[in-house]
Image (cartoon, rainbow, N blue to C red):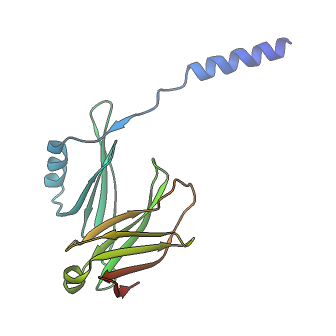
Amino acid sequence: MRVFIVVLLVCTVISGCQTEQITYQSPSDEQIDSYISDNNLEPLLIESRENYVTILCENSIHSISINKKGKLSRMYSSWSRGNNKMSVLSSSRVNEGKPTITVVLHDEELIAKATKISVTFSDGTLVSEQIERTRGFILEYPMITTAYKPYKKIELFQGKNVIFTQ
């Protein structure tokens, strides 16, 4: 019985001493503009979420947020240009548990003609989005999961016709 009480007291003290969880919020428009300017970015897409903003560029992606102390927090990844037509990055929105596929188009003809992009994930799940003269896309897997979900196929459509497959 004494051992149980000691264990219970130790657990209570340890749980009471845990550090507080770090919370984040989305940066303001001014902070986003400042980050873009300070880092000489040319955004293709700026996407706001509840507690962060994603900035997609020709060869990099940046996620920025503000911690409770008001300091900017950032994660970014860069890549060399893919094939001549498209760069693709598989990643995950860790906080949300949603795998994503980031696509950057390089081919001006595809940009001008494509009206829809479709991504088939490795488990057969299909995600599509209507597009119009857009270079950058972030498509996310529609369900929360901790499993990695790479893409199997990316297709660009003009109307109902497939004009590019990777």
User: For the image shown, how many numbered marks are present on the structure?
Assistant: 0
Identity of the residue drawn at 18% across and 56% down: 39
Q: Is residue 166 above or below residue 52?
A: below
Q: Is residue 59 visible?
A: no
Q: Which part of the image, by quadrant, shows the N terminus? A: top right
Tell me if 156 is positioned left or right of 109 in this view. Answer: right
Q: Position of residue 138 (x, y in %)?
A: 34, 64
Image coordinates of residue 67 in percent, x first then y, are 33, 36
Point 32% across, 46% down: residue: 52
Q: Residue at x 19, y 50 (%)?
A: 35
Q: Residue at x 47, y 59 (%)?
A: 142
Quadrant in which the C terminus is drawn: bottom left
List the single residue furthest toward the right: 1
Question: Does 99 appear above or below 117?
Answer: above
Location of residue 41 (image quadrant):
bottom left
Query: Where's residue 118, x and y in %?
Result: 39, 74
For residue 10, say whether it is visible. Answer: yes
Q: Does residue 135 appear left or right of residue 147 in this picture?
A: left
Q: Nearer the viewer, residue 79 or 95?
A: 95
Q: Nearer the viewer, residue 69 or 90?
A: 90
**x and y percent of residue 165 in the render?**
39, 85
In the picture, residue 116 is in which quadrant?
bottom left
Of residues 82 and 26, the one nearer the viewer is 26
